[in-house]
Amino acid sequence: MTDKDQANPLSGPLLLLMAAAVSATAATLYYNQPLLPEIGKTFGLGDEALGLVPSASQMGYAVAILLISPLGDTIGRRDLISYLSMLLTVALLAVFVAPNFGVLVAASFVAGLGANITQQLIPLGAALSNPDTRGKTMGTLMTGLTIGILLSRTVSGSIAEYFGWRSVFLFAAILAAFFGVLLRMKLPAQKPQVSLRYPELIVSMFGLIKTHKLLRESALTGALWFAAFNALWATLAIHVTAEPFFFTVQQAGLFGLVGMAGIFGAKVSGRLVDTFGPGRLISVALVCIALAFVVLAIWGDSLAGLVVGIILLDLGVFGAQIPNQVRVFSIDPSAQSRMNAVYMLGYYLAAAFGSAAGVKIMSLAGWHGVAIFGLSLAVLALLYHLCHQLKPDQGAGSEVTQQG
């Protein structure tokens, strides 16, 4: 790292580049969701089989979190991000040319592996920022993540409407290659935090889970709300392209614009987490998520009900994500990549489960079944979180530590 990098390792332009790269990379996990009806037509598949597509990308992402994310503590993240960018580009091109459904699912899984770029950039941002600006830095990076997740559906739906669903993944491959080159040029080189052999590195994550109660609570709470979130978004296109809406794929993708409320939730959480503490913000956000599914269960067959429910859901999910990750990164600065790996592994295993379960429930019990499923997960997350907040070892003294 140069003297200039050491003096100002996380400049404004670099932070914006990292946020943009997080946005573009995260989007690759969600492009397929509004495209499921069109993919089904191409390969002659029903709703139940189609659930494998979003599940494969999420499962690949979860596997990468377990096996690749921890490497950020032992090797340079800039080099690791370069390799992942190449892998992601190739996988997206494979989705673009997939001759059959099996290849499509396999390529989606590999794309999930390559999308681990986001889980290298987020801990890197935490490592490069000062403790008193970490909340703001995380807010900026998570805003990028929010934009990528939400706009991905609008972008993919719009491109597919005019050029077909395959063209979405060609666009994504070009974008992945572009950011891969920029990040290689602009990211500072960093020395590894620890010196461990790969098997020891992976095994050490189980020790972190055993040692840190706050890590366990954060991971399980986040997993529950993200499973509910993905159950909703994996089935939304199926719901609105059928009776009573009969929307086009492009119109289904426009619901991503409604979910842009999540950006507001992320920004506000990033600013308030150091003032009110992570625990309180997470409690409020979980109530918001539960209310969202109540609205979707009662009024989910109307456009107004869908809009209100999606706004509440995305406000809650992304409003909870910032304080949850801030407290995870504050547990042990020398193990940030592994802490993040444990947390995000649960997050995206739950996403894969939520996507597959949501599509299955949709085929058996319809939209209202999905809404009740999401509500159950949200209430369980809230009760579990509140239970831990009320325990003596989660009181005011530890809350300061959680804030970082």
Image (tube, rainbow, N blue to C red):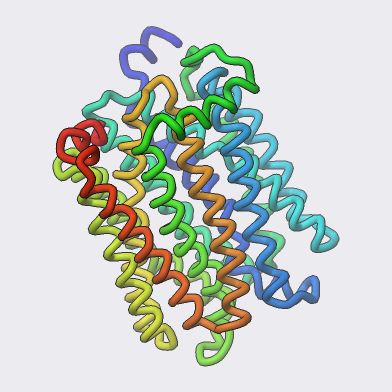
Residue at x 46%, y 41% (from the top left corner): 343
Q: Which of 36 and 397 lies nearest the eye of the viewer?
A: 397
Mark yes or no: residue 242 visible.
yes
In the image, residue 182 sits, relative to residue 192, either above or below, namely below
Residue located 47% across and 47% down the image? 23
Of all residues, the one furthest to the front in this rendering is 392
Q: Is residue 271 visible?
A: no
Front residue of 244/300: it is 300
Q: Left or right: 13 with respect to 342?
A: left
Q: Position of residue 138 (x, y in %)?
A: 34, 38
Task: Decide if residue 237 is on the left or right side of residue 322.
Answer: right
Image quadrant holding the C terminus, namely top left
**Residue 308 pos. (x, y %):** 32, 76
Front-most of residues 110 and 163? 110
Query: Which quadrant is home to the N terminus?
Result: top left
Residue sitting farthest toward the top: 3
